[in-house]
């Protein structure tokens, strides 16, 4: 039990007690039944309805009382005389739809018609469902390869696009991707220092210094380590990027189909 001093300073406490008792009686609940519905002891209801004790429910309990007695908090506090909740607020409370959307629908028949169509389960269930949303959550990750920059990054993106274009879907994996990279980025295309040959990639400018040094074993450049790094740092990310694009296209097509269906209905 809580004494709400802030409420007590602005509202007639006895009115709150009277309103709780009156509304409970109108709804046909006993004190015990109301107590059970809001998860408190019967003594709490007795105290709240006693105009002489000046004991009020907590804000949370007051909200629960309003829900169970189907009335507004303003009514319990004595601000209004009608226990009925304003229709838009009531509709928003039970539907979860924001009041401004409901008001816009009331004011604009075309908007309401559109909302009703797109919210209908038969129309939107294949777009807004757990499978679709989980797919987006799965692939909507940090889909960048910012650890790699410059010409090397651009080359890798092009290589992956080529790899996907010619590789059967059941053969897309890190091993086949690695083989493809080795064919497109042979050791001869890699340079460890500035070179006037534009066909070569100066990798020191494309990765962090720490990463660059990790490609060396006993002072010698280890091409195998270099390719392993590229595979591990780009395959999953670029694959996720591809899946995002596929999902975006699918979703866009579904929205277009649904909109055409709406216009034809």
Image (spheres, rainbow, N blue to C red):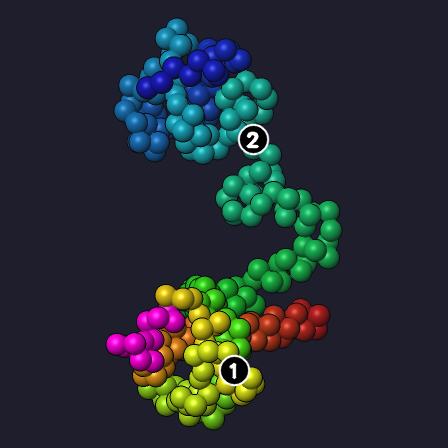
Q: Is residue 88 above or below residue 18?
A: below
| Residue 65 seen in the figure | no
Q: Where residue 14 appears, x then y in whole percent?
A: 46, 11
Quadrant containing the C terminus in the rendered view? bottom right
Q: Nearer the viewer, residue 251 or 40?
A: 251
SS under mark 1: loop
Q: Where residue 169 appears, x then y in whole percent?
A: 41, 88
Q: Which residues are magenta?
A: 211-221
Q: Where residue 130 appears, x then y in whole percent?
A: 42, 64
Q: Label 1: how many residues lie within 10 Å, few (<14), some (14-19) or many (20+)?
A: few
Q: Nearer the viewer, residue 208 or 66?
A: 208
Q: Is residue 229 magenta?
A: no
Which residue occupies 31% across, 80% down? 220
Q: Dividing the picture into quarters, in which one does residue 42 lie?
A: top left
Which residue occupies 56% across, 31% down? 84
Q: Dividing the picture into quarters, in which one does residue 38 lie?
A: top left
| Residue 207 seen in the figure | yes
Which residue occupies 73% across, 57% down? 110
Q: Label 2: how many residues lie within 10 Å, few (<14), some (14-19) or many (20+)?
A: few
- Which label was assigned to residue 145? none
Residue carrying label 1: 195
Question: What whole-number distance in Å separates the C-alpha atoms at marks 2 and 1?
Answer: 81 Å
Q: Nearer the viewer, residue 243 or 218?
A: 218
- Which label was assigned to residue 84? 2
SS under mark 2: loop
Residue 254 vs residue 173: left or right? right
């Amino acid at each position: 039990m809580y004494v709400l001093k802030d409420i007590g300073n602005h509202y007639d406490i006895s009115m709150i007690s009277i309103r709780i008792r009156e509304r409970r009686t109108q709804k046909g609940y006993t004190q015990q039944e109301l107590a059970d519905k809001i998860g408190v002891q019967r003594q709490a209801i007795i105290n709240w309805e006693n105009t002489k004790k000046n004991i009020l429910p907590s804000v949370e309990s007051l909200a629960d009382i309003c829900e169970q007695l189907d009335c507004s908090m303003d009514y319990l506090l004595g601000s209004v005389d009608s226990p009925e909740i304003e229709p838009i607020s009531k509709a928003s409370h039970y539907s979860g739809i924001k009041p401004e959307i409901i008001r816009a629908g009331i004011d604009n028949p075309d908007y309401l018609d559109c909302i009703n169509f797109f919210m209908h389960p038969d129309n939107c269930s294949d777009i807004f469902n757990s499978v679709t949303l989980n797919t987006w959550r799965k692939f909507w990750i940090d889909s960048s390869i910012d650890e790699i920059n410059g010409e090397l990054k651009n080359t890798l993106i092009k290589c992956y696009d080529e790899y996907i274009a010619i590789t059967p879907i059941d053969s897309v994996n890190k091993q086949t991707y690695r083989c493809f990279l080795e064919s497109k980025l042979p050791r001869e295309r890699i340079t460890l220092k500035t070179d006037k040959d534009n066909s070569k990639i100066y990798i020191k400018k494309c990765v962090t210094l720490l990463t660059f040094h990790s490609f060396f074993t006993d002072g010698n450049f280890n091409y195998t380590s270099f390719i392993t790094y590229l595979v591990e740092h780009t395959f999953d990310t670029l694959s996720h990027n591809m899946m995002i694009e596929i999902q975006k296209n699918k979703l866009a097509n579904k929205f277009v189909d649904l909109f055409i269906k709406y216009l034809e209905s």
